[in-house]
Image (cartoon, rainbow, N blue to C red):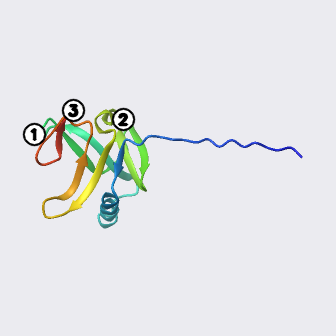
Amino acid sequence: MNDILIEEEIRTELLPVSFTESAVKEITRLMQSENIPADHALRVGVKGGGCSGMSYILGFDKKETGDTDYQIDGVHVIMNKSHELYLFGMQIDFQQGLNARGFVFENPNAKKTCGCGSSFSA
């Protein structure tokens, strides 16, 4: 009897961003309550502007040329490949406290952030 060795490919892809449990719950709630079309995913990115130079993008959108797909904690995420430079290692949280309500971005690449928390410089 011949032993057959089956090698499994082990893929350890580094994800550009992570979500806290509360962020995943809020994203899932929004997807269900807003009736997001099936061909849309959560877009995470950056754009020029804001009081510190760059602002975060977080919203539901269709995949475009140059986007990469990710499955992060059960959430389908799309991100323009060029934005990873600014966002790699970032954690997205959702807070519902007296001092803060909404999504909070903890970005290790930000050299300076503004008081509102949605703008940064790299």
Q: How far is mark 1 from mark 3, CA to CA?
A: 13 Å
- In the rendered structure, which amino acid carries the disc numbered 3? Ala
Query: What element does badge 2 sit on?
Result: helix
> Which residue is at the far right?
1
Q: What residue is shown with label 1?
A: 51
Q: Residue at x 14, y 35 (%)?
A: 53
- The image shows residue 19 at horizontal and vertical percentages of 34, 52
- The spot of residue 91 in percent (x, y) is 30, 48
Residue 105 in the image, given as x and y percentages of width and height:
24, 48
Q: CA distance from mark 2 to mark 1?
A: 24 Å
Q: Can you identify the residue that label 3 sits on?
A: 122
Q: Residues within 10 Å of mark 2 (few under 14, many from 20)?
A: some
Q: Residue at x 37, y 45 (%)?
A: 78
Number of numbered discs: 3
Q: Nearer the viewer, residue 98 or 118?
A: 98
**Amino acid carrying mark 2 in the image:** Lys
User: Residue 103: image x %, image y %?
Assistant: 23, 54
Give the SS element for disc 1: loop
Observer-nearest of 44 and 35: 44
Gap between marks 2 and 3, in whole Å? 17 Å
The answer to whether mark 1 and mark 3 are in CB contact below 8 A is no
Q: What kind of residue is marked 1?
A: Cys
Question: Residue 81 — which label?
Answer: 2
The residue at the point 72 percent across, 43 percent down is 6
Q: Earlier in the sequence, mark 2 or mark 3?
A: 2
Viewer-nearest residue: 56 or 20? 20
Pick whichever of labels 2 and 1 is earlier in the sequence: 1
Given this view, does label 2 or label 1 mark the residue nearer the observer?
1
